Amino acid sequence: MNLIPGKHVVVTDFDGGEGILVDLNTKKYFQLNETAMVVWKGLEQGKTVSEIAGDITSKYEVALDNATRSVERIVDNFQTYKLLSASWASSDCQTRDSHSGDLFTADLVFRLRA
Amino acid sequence: MPVDAVVVDGRPGLLWMQLADVSFSEPFFQQTVDRVRAEHPNRTARFTEFDTLLQLNQILPRVEPAGFIFHSSRCGSTLLANACRCVDDSIVLSEPFPIDKLVARFTTDAHDPVKEALYSVFLRAVVNALAQSSKGRVFIKFSCCSVSQLERISRIWPRVPWVFLYRDPIETIVSNVTNPPEWLLDEDRRILAHITATSTAQVTEMSLEELCARSIGSFFFTAHTLANDNSMLLNYNQLSLSVISNVLRFFGVEPTAPEIDAVDNRRRVYSKNPEDRPFVSDAETKRQNASELVRDVAERWANGPYSLLELKRS
């Protein structure tokens, strides 16, 4: 099973590599740092965790196992917020984010609501 | 097109209006919106939250503005905007509410880096949505208070050239206190407190003269600090036809003879009400009419940074 970005999520680039995601179901916004954006874009292209980790090692000076752990953590965060869907699923647009409150990790920066 | 940034039932978002067939011929964007409302009462504005803007931004082509105009108030920026309007197929978005209000959010919510990032994305998307109405170049004239966010705006559009227009402090203060503009009377004192590096309570206590002097001094200082190869400093007293033509070239436009003629015609009328009266310079009158208080606050808060700007310009 490959994980891909949900159709209910819109991504916008800004400031040289960072980005903002908006979950159209919940109207929650997520700020992504550069690494998280690399992961998101990799998932958009249908890449696996190991392929994305490989991309990161070619872009940054980081060991493969560290990069893999980072990617896994970021993907976990995306899943926690129901921002991804399985590639075989027709759609998970109706999923609702039941989480509330802010989450902060090193890679996926937190929920915000203007 | 987005015509305002508002909060409806606690939800921040935009008001949209059908403006695809509209010419932005008025000196200010809001005047165009008001005209359309009067001419087409059935064109009601529709509210959406900001996520709609971001969805739209996914499918719209990216439009990079040709140039930005910043200014220190009452210093010829509307004349320059009108000159940009003379370029074929161009539009000038002059102080549109959605841009103005989003830029103001940088000031009022500056303590929150996440909101700062979000507003940057919204601002870029709003400008892109507004720019779609042009078949050619898009110029944006920001409100004077936006100068306080010049660094951030330059970061969002690092390649867009910008001009900062300014004028002799005494002339500027006299003009502003004689006929106070909205920015100087803003009841939400947070913007002016930020610009003048004071508190909202201090802003409330200030005379209009001091508030204006401190504000333009701050604008001058910011422009002086940030001016670089991608910017042009321009004094009101330089605004000849040849200088305006040079500004257009700086914005990447080689004006044609008919366009230069059109600019020249625009120069001869009062820029904020072109159909009303011919332009007559009032610089000397303003200087003669300046009170002691105006001279004092100009000296105390604005003349220093003005001199720095002049030095850098030359």
Image (cartoon, rainbow, N blue to C red):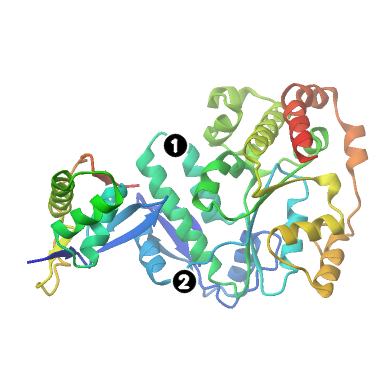
User: Local crowd at mark 2 within 10 Å, few (<14), some, or many (≥20)?
Assistant: few
Quarter of the rendering occupied by the C terminus of chain B: top right
Using the image, determine if residue B276 lies above or below residue B21.
above
Name the N-terminal-most of marks 2 and 1: 2
Q: Position of residue B238 (x, y in %)?
A: 85, 48
Residue B19 makes an appearance in the image: yes
Please name the residue shown 35% across and 42% down the image. Answer: B114
In the rendered image, the vertical position of residue A14 relative to residue B174, given as above or below: below
Apparent side of residue B235 relative to residue A18 in the rendered image (left or right)? right
Task: Kindly identify the residue that appears in the image at 54 percent across and 27 percent down.
Answer: B200
For the residue labelled by badge 1, is the local secondary structure a helix, a strand or a loop? loop
User: Which is closer to the viewer, label 2 or label 1?
Assistant: 2
**Residue A27 visible in the picture:** no
Residue A49 percent coordinates (x, y)? 14, 57
Q: Give the residue type at disc 1.
A: Ala
Q: Residue at coordinates 90% horizontally, 48% vertically from top-left? A: B281
Instruction: Decide: is B54 above or below B100.
Output: below
Q: Chain of mark 2?
A: B
- Which residue is under mark 1? B110
Q: Is residue A95 left or right of residue A36?
A: left
In the orientation shown, which residue stands out farthest toward the left?
A: A1
Foreground of the two, A12 or B275: A12
Say the numbered circle drawn on residue A43: none
Q: Position of residue B206 (x, y in %)?
A: 66, 24
